[in-house]
Amino acid sequence: MDPMSAMFMVAGLILLIGSWLIMINVSFQTDYSWGLCALFVPPIAYLYGLFRWPLAGESILMSILGWVMLFLAWG
């Protein structure tokens, strides 16, 4: 793996983890049960974020950027 791919992979993973943590924070602030679902089942957190776009829009965009970076690392 070349250094540029490694950089994209690490940056993408950091963005994905950061977006998940933001999503957990937003969901716990809104409702305790959604917060627990977001904590234990990460895909549910992003589904919740799609329905609460004004609150969690930046987290969704951050996760999309993270996936793009991971795709570029493998490409």
Image (spheres, grey):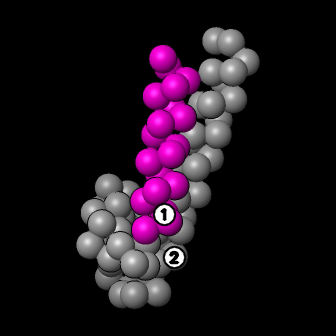
Q: Is residue 53 visible?
A: yes
Q: Earlier in the sequence, mark 2 or mark 1?
A: 2
**Residue 24 image point, x, y percent:** 47, 71
Magenta residues span 57-75
User: Would you place residue 67 above or below residue 41 in this image?
Assistant: above
Disc number placed over residue 75 in the picture, else none: none
Q: Camera-side residue: 51 or 31?
A: 51
| Tally of numbered discs | 2
Q: Main secondary structure of the magenta part?
A: helix
Q: Camera-side residue: 20 or 64?
A: 64
* Tag 2 secondary structure: helix
Crowding around mark 1 (Cα neighbors within 10 Å: few <14, some 14 to 19, many 20+) is many
**Residue 17 image point, x, y percent:** 55, 52
Determine contact: label 2, label 1, CB under 8 Å: no
User: Would you place residue 10 above or below residue 34 in this image?
Assistant: above
Q: Which residue is mark 2?
A: 25
Residue for point 44% across, 48% down: 64
Q: Which residue is mark 1?
A: 59
Distance from the alpha carbon under mark 2 to that under mark 1: 10 Å
Instruction: Tell me which amino acid carries mark 1.
Output: Ser
Tell me if 27 is positioned left or right of 51 in this view.
right
Instruction: Tell me which amino acid carries mark 2.
Output: Asn
Residue for point 62% across, 47% down: 14
Residue for point 33% across, 76% down: 52
